[in-house]
Amino acid sequence: MQRAIYSTVLAGSLVGLSAPAAFADTDKPQYRLIQLQADATREVTNNQMEAVLFTELNSNSPTSLSQDITRTLNEAMRQAAKYPQVKVSTGAQSTYPIYDDKNKLKGWRARAQIELKSTDFKATSDLIAALQDKMQVQSINFSVSDDERKRVENELMVEASQAFQQRARLLQQSWQASGYELVSLDLNAMNNERPPIMYAMKARDAAASMESQNVQGGNSQLRVNASGSVQLR
């Protein structure tokens, strides 16, 4: 069920409207100028799943370590190719030395990540399960996709503007004014998404069968705030 909620919270400007120059002239005194705010808020189902997986290996040889990391990533990419619904990209990679308690070099450690993104939760979960014989899950996050966010925010901009006008009319009546003029209006988009789900899972035995996880994306709260001023006639 979709609904609008009105409050008084202000964020960064998304859209700004200005009144005619007559009202913007700061040299002229402005009387009966009123500052207003109104919000439109909606709970939106998270339709996008993002996951970060990583591999971390040790070796006495940086060359051998680099080859092992490369093989692991290449195998992960081959597995991911079976799931065209999931967008896969390589993430951060690093190699650094390991020293003993006497500050003597004793080996090397490398870490590499891949990032998954898709609106197909089942395919993403299946791919994560397939990759966990050699990689571990660092985090899983659910969010609203860009296309869905833009669509909802466009609707909320209209709702917030209407709520702003409604408040302006109520104040007009309260002050027994004949009407009002819009001086300025800012429309600001905000959201409250679920934080990433952090994991600390060990890589599974390659011979073991890893069952894919059933996931629920939950909701995010999208909001557009209308903030501005009107001048009563």
Image: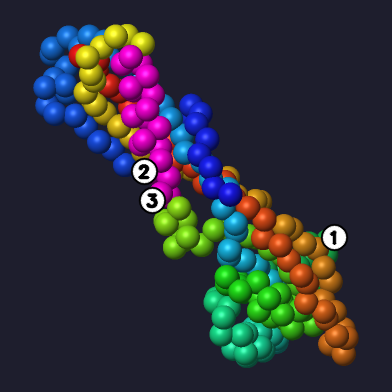
Are the two marked residues, 3 and 2, in contact with CB atoms closer than 8 angstroms? Answer: yes
Residue 25 visible here: yes
User: Residue 102 magenta-drawn?
Assistant: no
Q: Main secondary structure of the magenta part?
A: helix
21 or 140: which is nearer to us?
A: 21
Amino acid beneath label 2: Val
Residue interval drawn in magenta:
153-173
Side of 117 relative to 176 (left or right) = right
- Dot 1 falls on a residue whose secondary structure is loop
- Dot 3 falls on a residue whose secondary structure is helix
Which residue has dot 3 on it? 154
- Dot 2 falls on a residue whose secondary structure is helix
x, y percentage for residue 207? 87, 90
Identify which residue is drawn at 48% across, 27% down: 8
Amino acid beneath label 3: Asn
User: Which of the two marks, 1 or 2, is nearer to us in this view?
Assistant: 2
Q: Which mark is residue 158?
A: 2
Identify which residue is drawn at 61% across, 85% down: 83
Which of the image's four quarters has the C terminus?
A: top left
